[in-house]
Image (cartoon, coloured by chain):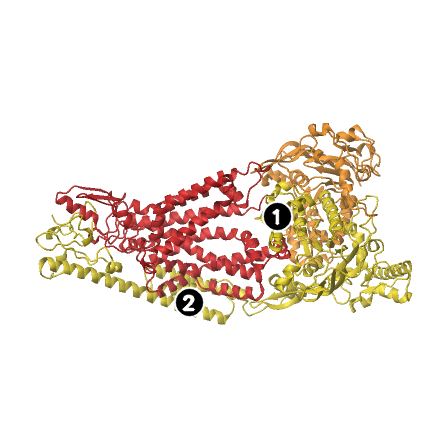
């Protein structure tokens, strides 16, 4: 991680709503987090928790999907993004903030060559001429470890395999040396062997280029492999944030702990301890702590009052990070009352 | 735990032998077979009652195809499937339908696996109704029981699938599979699409059901940790073949095949402190249309040796000294086969592992020295591309040809040019058709239009077919024209003649003489008369007798209430003869 | 329909969420105001078609003279000399029996109470089936050795002339005629090509027939043409497309080649040729011809849908449950595959109406019925504005309405079900 730990992107109390036929969906409800320069922040959560919506809100792409930012601020590199016009946003998108998507099959335009697609954003933002752009495209393909880049640059997406398409997507995203790369489930559609290659590539690129990465995923294994810090989202809110070691070793929210219990163990075949119940419907989230209907530790307060994000004592500090920048917050009434409680060890304990 | 120990038993529930499934790649008008997708090739394994066999591999390795071929949802190309000793592939359709009660499937996608037009009651209960002939209330009772077992509220029995969440839908899918008390369930990526917390619930449910009903699972998944958790034995597939099959823990702790090793090292482990060693495994799975020769993994294998690309390694069953109780361990790799040969009869497990490890390391080191060899393996063979998609591939081939021979200009017009030329001509003809039609010169217009329409037809097959179709269209056009003009002129003549003769008859009957000209009738001829007048019940036969004393009067047409007399100069009033049955209404005064 | 849907069993704990697929489609359809307006317009058209004899006809509803009372209108409804075409017979039967049907529907609905919404389609289907059976029976002259009581061919009296004559003779005549006192078939050569007036609202055609009456009865023809022709080709297309898509292989190849050969012919020329080859064309011939030449689109649509749905997991699950192929095809896949066909059928109705009008316009239609296209043709040959504008607007109006409804239906069916 680079030494400069000033914040690059700061979300403060962000609220995003969608108006649907069935009612208003408060997809993101008071989300705050910070991505620092040169770090990878992973957003983890199950489907429908609002993790992708948040990233679309950062790029201001939700307006085209009947969504709106109703409150809060997004500060990127000192600029407030929520008040920018779409014209101003277009200059930021792809240039300062780039995004790669889950589906490498559909994200590339089948009628243009790989080179043309990489070149397009280059000539748009940097104003390169054809030869320069082509050379730059080859350089970018080499940067993402594309084999035989000079030939691949003239090929069409259908001639590439899934892993290579995802490499092209990353090359396109890197074309303008963005300060922030948003990777929305970048490896979900890929096979494990290819996923390992892409994750490794992302980690290498980040340390080479010193950019920040906002990684959105549901896979805790991916998080463990590449993230520096993790924010866990549930039902439109961030429930826990910490560095990756702290979060995996000392979770302070029952939901985070429940996720770990749900994973099959590598040693022994103990029965899994899944979180009971179902992911709540976005149209009517529960009151109070939104996790309380599924929570084994819930107390009466959880039903009525929304818990604030409280600071916890750090047990596993991240190496090479000043303690002031390395915080652990979680939004849970129970652990705030009993900060010493070890959620990973406590098995079948139930408070009524 | 009981999940760890595979159930004992001697007769396998399911025995699969040399099962092969090829998908033909077809092209052209008559679906000529141009290639084969070798999705599953010579797969053999056995499954005991109550046992779970995990089936893992990357996408396109044929694991789902294998599951469906066993259930005959896809008809296998060759091989043998025996269920409790009965030959499944030789069964008649009716026998197969009955057999299906014992072998069920749970699917990956909880959204598309339930029929959106059916209520849960029907989805789960349909099989009961068909196979068990249960009555409505019995069926409802049984469905409620099943739903309770899988943890879906029974009060929702009348709901439609879209009202459920993904996890609940998957539970409904499980209830549907359980309805007929099967002995084998193929779980085709049954938990892959679910969120982590829900996935754990469903895995627990599957394990409970297995113990409760002594179910055997063929558990297909790409998530290796779940497979390890649930399976007694695991088979690893690569490009349609099983490359390694062994007891679950043995496979995960001491993998022998380089592909298994690569796969295991690639799983992201949820532990930030455990950064796995890198495995030099590049590129993607090659296409199964033209799988690599020899060992199918050799194009990506970090430890390949010269023999791998020429010979297919045998599926070696380990003969380990001592413990005969452990399930057999099969590996399809030269390194293991060679190690076994080198160690002689009945080596111990540790000896074998060390020997295989040594051989793999040696081969890997050899390859690392000649770097860059990996790059070739990353390419998709152009021939395979051509078989995959015909149009873009020909384009790609054209590009490649162009790249190799830069300036070989082709003087003959390309099909595209010909097409463009034909379209130009056709456009002109179409315009001509519209103009001739517009000028009122109707006869040739359809022909010209037809000719002009011709080149715009999408994908015309061949010149011979073009000629046939053109001849047919020409005949059609002539027939239309002839028939149209004929019938129109006949109708017109008949109608005019009928009108005129009626007119003349009226005139004659009234005046006793024939008119000298049409002007005497005071009547202009209708241009085109409706031939229906000939048998029109209204006018028929246009003769009205007057009830008055002077004998006869007539009217040509009938009338409205305020209709003025038609032939004022002839002094004719519109009078109608009361018909016989109308006598009681209006007889003569 | 909505009332029936909103009221579900009071003991069911989750009544608000229970919505079948059709109810959801209807909910979405209702949001499209123009399409709903289109549905209302279709309703008005159907009403006009059914009520046409009451709105225009020359047989009095009530006629009293010299102490005798007659109701010639009602017996006239089934007089084959007054209403020659089967289409008119169908609608006249409906006109007479509609109150009865409404009563039956109402009684069944009352009796089944809140459970009714499940039987909605069954009751409606039974009534339609009964009516069609009755219509077929009424079309037969002899039922065994008995004369069909619904089959009349009585000579027709001209009551206008009779009334005029009787009044001229000093008798007191009391009569009630339909709204416009003209039959659509009654010719009056002396009054041909009259411009619109208070008497003839839309003028008369070259043979003095009242254009207003012909437009009214033309509604019947157009609607019937649309529904029956589309019904025929949807039937053929669904069966062939389902076979091709489900079984694949050789079946698929032959059916697909057949479809391609059919598509090679410009369909309108094919229709023209077939129509020209039939000597005594009735309107049903025209419907059948349109039906048997237009099925290719539906077949291709259904084939594609079946190819897609066959490999979907719910269909695979149905096969895996050991259900018969017939059941998999018709109970499981077809209801899911039919939605795009419904949309295309709505557009198909519009195009069938247009085709029939075009045939009549070219003089190759059924000459015994009052078709809009035929009036248009007269207008063209006679160069009279009202003979072109009135039927032209009617055709435009109906075709537009069906297209609007089709678009609404497409939008309502298109979005994936809420997950």
Q: Is residue C356 above or below residue A180?
A: below
Mark 1 crowdedness (10 Å alpha carbons): few <14, some 14-19, many ≥20: some
Dots 1 and 2: beta carbons under 8 Å?
Answer: no
Q: What is the chain letter for disc 1? A: B
Q: Residue B424, can we see it? A: yes
Q: Colour of chain B?
A: yellow
Count of numbered badges drawn on the protein: 2
Q: Secondary structure at mark 2?
A: helix
Q: Nearer the viewer, residue C211 or B72?
A: B72
Q: Along the horizontal axis of the image, is C110 left or right of C82?
A: right
Q: Residue B408, can we see it? A: no
Q: Nearer the viewer, residue B388 or B196?
A: B196
Q: Colour of chain A?
A: orange
State which quadrant residue C63 falls in: top left
Q: Along the horizontal axis of the image, is B444 left or right of A289?
A: left
> What residue is at 74 percent from the left and 45 percent from the top?
B200
- Which disc number belongs to residue B138? 1
- Which disc number belongs to residue B531? none
Q: Which residue is mark 2?
A: B473
Q: Nearer the viewer, residue B3 or A139?
A: B3
- Please state the horizontal and vertical placement of residue B575, each as a whole percent of the image: 15, 51
- Please state the horizontal and vertical placement of residue C129, each as a whole percent of the image: 43, 52
């Amino acid at each position: 991680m680079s030494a400069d730990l000033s914040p690059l992107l700061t979300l403060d109390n962000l609220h995003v709503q969608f108006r649907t036929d069935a009612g208003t969906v408060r997809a993101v409800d008071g989300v705050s987090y910070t991505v620092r320069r040169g770090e990878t922040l992973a957003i983890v959560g199950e489907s429908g928790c609002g993790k992708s919506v948040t990233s679309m809100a950062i790029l201001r792409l939700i307006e085209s999907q009947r969504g709106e930012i109703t409150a809060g601020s997004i500060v990127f590199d000192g600029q407030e993004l929520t008040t920018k016009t779409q014209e101003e946003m277009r200059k930021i998108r792809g240039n300062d903030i780039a995004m790669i998507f889950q589906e490498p099959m559909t994200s590339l335009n089948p009628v243009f060559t790989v080179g043309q697609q990489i070149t397009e954003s280059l000539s748009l933002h940097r104003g390169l001429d054809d030869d320069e752009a082509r050379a730059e495209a080859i350089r970018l393909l080499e940067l993402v470890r594309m084999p035989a880049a000079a030939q691949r640059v003239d090929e069409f997406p259908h001639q590439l395999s899934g892993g290579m398409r995802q490499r092209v997507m990353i090359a396109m995203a890197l074309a303008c040396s963005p300060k922030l790369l948003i990777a929305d489930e970048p490896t979900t559609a890929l096979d494990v062997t290819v996923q390992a290659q892409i994750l490794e590539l992302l980690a290498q690129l980040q340390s080479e280029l010193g950019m920040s990465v906002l990684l959105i995923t549901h896979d805790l294994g991916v998080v463990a492999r590449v993230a520096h810090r993790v924010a866990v989202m549930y039902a439109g809110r961030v429930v826990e944030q910490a560095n990756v070691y702290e979060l995996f070793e000392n979770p302070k929210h029952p939901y985070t702990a429940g996720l770990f219990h749900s994973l099959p163990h590598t040693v022994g075949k103990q029965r899994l301890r899944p979180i009971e119940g179902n992911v709540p419907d976005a149209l009517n989230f529960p009151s109070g702590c939104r996790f309380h209907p599924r929570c084994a530790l819930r107390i009466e307060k959880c039903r009525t009052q929304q818990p604030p994000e409280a600071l916890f004592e750090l047990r596993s500090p991240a190496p090479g990070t000043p303690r002031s920048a390395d915080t652990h917050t979680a939004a849970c009434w129970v652990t705030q009352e009993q900060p010493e409680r070890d959620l990973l060890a406590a098995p079948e304990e139930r408070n009524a | 735990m009981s999940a760890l120990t595979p159930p004992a038993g001697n007769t396998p529930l399911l025995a699969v032998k040399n099962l092969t499934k090829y998908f033909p790649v077809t092209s052209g008008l008559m679906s000529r077979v141009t290639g084969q997708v070798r999705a599953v090739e010579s797969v053999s394994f056995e499954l005991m009652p109550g046992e779970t066999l995990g089936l893992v591999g990357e996408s396109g390795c044929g694991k789902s195809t294998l599951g469906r071929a066993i259930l005959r949802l896809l008809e296998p190309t060759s091989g043998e499937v025996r269920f409790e000793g009965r030959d499944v592939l030789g069964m008649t359709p009716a026998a197969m339908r009955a057999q299906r009660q014992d072998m069920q499937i749970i699917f990956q996608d909880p959204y598309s696996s339930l029929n959106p037009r059916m209520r849960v009651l029907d989805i789960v209960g349909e099989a009961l109704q068909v196979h068990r002939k249960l009555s409505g209330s019995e069926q409802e009772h049984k469905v409620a029981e099943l739903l309770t077992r899988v943890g879906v509220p029974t009060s929702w029995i009348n709901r439609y699938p879209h009202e459920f969440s993904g996890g609940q839908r998957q539970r409904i899918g499980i209830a549907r599979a359980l309805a007929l008390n099967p002995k084998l369930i193929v779980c085709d990526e049954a938990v892959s699409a679910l969120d982590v917390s829900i996935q754990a619930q469903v895995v627990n449910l599957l394990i409970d059901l297995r113990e409760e009903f002594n179910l055997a699972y063929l558990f297909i998944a790409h998530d290796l940790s779940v497979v390890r958790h649930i399976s007694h034995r695991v088979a690893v597939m690569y490009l349609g073949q099983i490359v390694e099959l062994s007891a679950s823990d043995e496979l995960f702790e001491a993998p022998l095949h380089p592909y298994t090793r690569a796969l295991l090292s690639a799983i992201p482990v949820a532990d930030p402190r455990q950064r796995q060693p890198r495995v030099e495994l590049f590129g993607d799975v090659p296409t199964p249309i033209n799988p690599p020769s020899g060992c199918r993994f050799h194009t990506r294998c970090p430890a390949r040796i010269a023999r791998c690309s020429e010979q297919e390694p045998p599926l070696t069953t380990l003969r380990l000294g001592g413990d005969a109780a452990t399930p057999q361990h099969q590996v399809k790799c030269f390194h293991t086969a060679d190690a076994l040969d080198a160690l002689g009869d009945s080596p111990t497990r540790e000896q074998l592992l060390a020997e295989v490890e040594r051989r793999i390391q040696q081969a890997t080191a050899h390859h690392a020295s000649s770097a860059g060899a990996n790059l070739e393996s990353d390419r998709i063979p152009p021939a395979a591309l051509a078989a995959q998609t015909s149009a873009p591939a020909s384009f790609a081939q054209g590009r490649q040809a162009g790249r190799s021979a830069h300036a070989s200009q082709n003087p003959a017009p390309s099909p595209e040019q010909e097409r463009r030329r034909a379209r130009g001509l056709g456009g002109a003809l179409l315009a001509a058709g519209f103009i001739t039609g517009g000028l009122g010169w109707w006869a040739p217009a359809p022909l010209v239009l037809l000719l002009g329409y011709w080149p715009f037809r999408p994908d015309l097959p061949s010149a011979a077919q073009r000629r046939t179709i053109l001849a047919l269209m020409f005949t059609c056009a002539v027939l239309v024209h002839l028939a149209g003009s004929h019938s129109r002129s006949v109708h017109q003549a008949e109608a005019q003649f009928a009108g005129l003769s009626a007119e003349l008859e009226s005139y004659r009957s009234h005046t006793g003489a024939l008119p000298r000209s049409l002007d005497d009738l005071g009547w202009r001829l209708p241009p085109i008369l409706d031939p229906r007048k000939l048998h029109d019940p209204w006018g028929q036969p246009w003769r009205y007798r007057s009830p008055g004393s002077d004998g006869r009067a007539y009217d040509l047409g009938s009338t409205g209430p305020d209709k003025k007399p038609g032939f004022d100069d002839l002094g004719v009033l519109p009078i109608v003869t009361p018909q016989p049955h109308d006598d009681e209404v209006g007889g003569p005064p | 329909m909505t009332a029936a849907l909103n009221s579900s069993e009071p003991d069911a704990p989750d009544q608000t969420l229970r919505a079948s697929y059709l109810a959801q489609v209807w909910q979405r359809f209702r949001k499209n105001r123009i399409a709903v307006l289109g549905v209302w317009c279709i309703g008005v058209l159907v009403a006009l078609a059914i009520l046409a004899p009451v709105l225009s006809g020359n047989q009095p509803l009530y006629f009293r003279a010299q102490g005798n009372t007659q109701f010639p209108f009602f017996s006239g409804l089934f007089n084959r000399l007054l209403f020659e075409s089967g289409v008119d017979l169908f609608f006249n039967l409906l006109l007479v029996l509609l109150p009865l049907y409404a009563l039956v529907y109402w009684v069944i609905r009352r009796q089944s109470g809140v459970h009714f919404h499940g039987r909605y389609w069954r009751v409606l289907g039974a009534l339609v089936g009964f009516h069609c059976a009755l219509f077929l029976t009424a079309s037969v002259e002899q039922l065994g050795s008995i004369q069909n009581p619904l089959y009349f061919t009585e000579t027709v009296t001209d009551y206008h002339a009779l009334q005029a004559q009787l009044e001229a003779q000093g008798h007191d005549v009391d009569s009630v005629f339909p709204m416009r006192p003209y039959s659509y078939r009654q010719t009056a050569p002396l009054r041909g090509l009259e411009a619109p007036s208070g008497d003839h609202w839309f003028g008369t055609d070259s043979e003095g027939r009242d254009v207003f009456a012909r437009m009214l009865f033309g509604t019947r023809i157009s609607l019937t043409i649309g529904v029956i022709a589309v019904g025929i080709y949807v039937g053929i297309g669904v069966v062939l497309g389902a076979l091709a898509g489900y079984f694949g292989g050789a079946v698929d190849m032959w059916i697909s080649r057949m479809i391609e050969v059919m598509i090679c012919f410009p369909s309108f020329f094919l229709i023209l040729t077939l129509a020209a080859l039939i000597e005594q064309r009735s309107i049903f011939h025209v419907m059948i011809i349109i039906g048997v030449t237009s099925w290719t689109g539906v077949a291709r649509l259904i084939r594609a849908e079946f190819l897609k749905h066959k490999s979907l997991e719910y269909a695979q699950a149905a096969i895996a449950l050991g259900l018969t192929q017939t059941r998999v095809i018709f109970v499981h896949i077809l209801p899911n595959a039919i939605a795009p066909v419904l949309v295309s059928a709505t557009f198909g109705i519009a195009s069938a109406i247009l085709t029939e009008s075009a045939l009549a316009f070219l003089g190759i239609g059924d000459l015994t019925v009052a078709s809009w296209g035929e009036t248009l043709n007269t207008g063209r040959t006679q160069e009279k504005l009202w003979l072109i504008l009135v039927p032209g607007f009617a055709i435009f109006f109906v075709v537009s309405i069906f297209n609007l409804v089709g678009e609404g239906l497409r939008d309502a069916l298109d979005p994936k079900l809420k997950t």
